[in-house]
Amino acid sequence: MDKLPPRLILFSRLPVAGRVKTRLVPALGAQGAAALQDKLARRLAGRMRELAGRLPLELELCYTGGGEDQARAWLGPAFACVAQKPGHLGQRMAQALARALARGAPRAVLVGSDLPGLDADMLERAFAALERSPLALGPSTDGGYYLVGLSRPAPGLLEEPHWRSLAALSSRAAALGLEPALLPALRDLDTPSDLAYWAERDPQFRSWTDPTA
């Protein structure tokens, strides 16, 4: 039986006010922070669809913070919707990746929704990296990571506390005999300083957060 196409997973909370981007609430308010989360995720979803137009891919929204009907209505029919399983963040990411590989996807890439600089070309580079390495990682400038990709199962990779930083995850990967392919570093969006950074560099982003722009 032929394998399924590679799977690209958007790992995200649904944009419910007061439950997302809470560190940005002092700057944007609960509704504003949720609206920003919504716009960021929709833009990234568009870039994922763009890549799926160039490569054979399955797209998935792996969600939490709401029901299936809400998830299906959010990003449209191009995305399969799967609720995140219980557990800490590392467990939930591991479960999503393992499920994709177990279903027959030859490669699985998981990304968060708070990456203004993550585009289709960078996502394509992640899948290309998995042609030569079992693990692809996208470093964040804050010491974390914005992307994890696997081309084979890696039990224990994202166990507590190894999932909490890029350094810890890289050390765990080495212990498991996995040499990661590293993508270029990107800055994510978690704090007011990140908000200011992206407002200076991304005109569309600036229009989302500054009503006078």
Image (cartoon, rainbow, N blue to C red):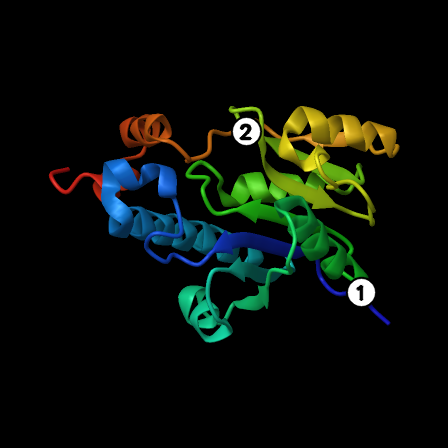
Q: Amino acid at mark 2?
A: Ser
Q: Position of residue 207 (x, y in %)?
A: 22, 41
Element type at marker 1? loop
Element type at marker 2? loop
Task: Tell me if I can see residue 50 in this picture.
Answer: no
Question: From the viewer's perspective, is 196 left or right of 81?
Answer: left
Q: Residue at x 26, y 37 (%)?
A: 26
Q: Position of residue 48 (x, y in %)?
A: 52, 53
Give the farthest residue toward the bottom: 69
Q: Position of residue 32 (x, y in %)?
A: 25, 48
Q: Residue at x 60, y 55 (%)?
A: 9
For the residues labelled 1 and 2, the Cα–Cα distance comes to 32 Å
Question: From the viewer's perspective, is 57 left or right of 45?
Answer: right
Where is mark 1, residue-wise? 3
Query: Residue 170's image quarter?
Result: top right
Q: Nearer the viewer, residue 15 or 119?
A: 15
Task: Tell me if I can see residue 89 in this picture.
Answer: yes
Q: Amino acid at mark 1?
A: Lys
Mark linked to residue 140: 2
Q: State which mark lies toward you, 1 or 2.
A: 2
- Tell me the quadrant of the picture where the C terminus can be found: top left
Precedes in sequence: disc 1 or disc 2: 1
Question: From the viewer's perspective, is 19 left or right of 174?
Answer: left
Callout 2: few (<14), some (14-19), or many (20+) C-alpha neighbours within 10 Å?
Answer: some
Mark linked to residue 117: none
Q: Position of residue 195 (x, y in %)?
A: 32, 32
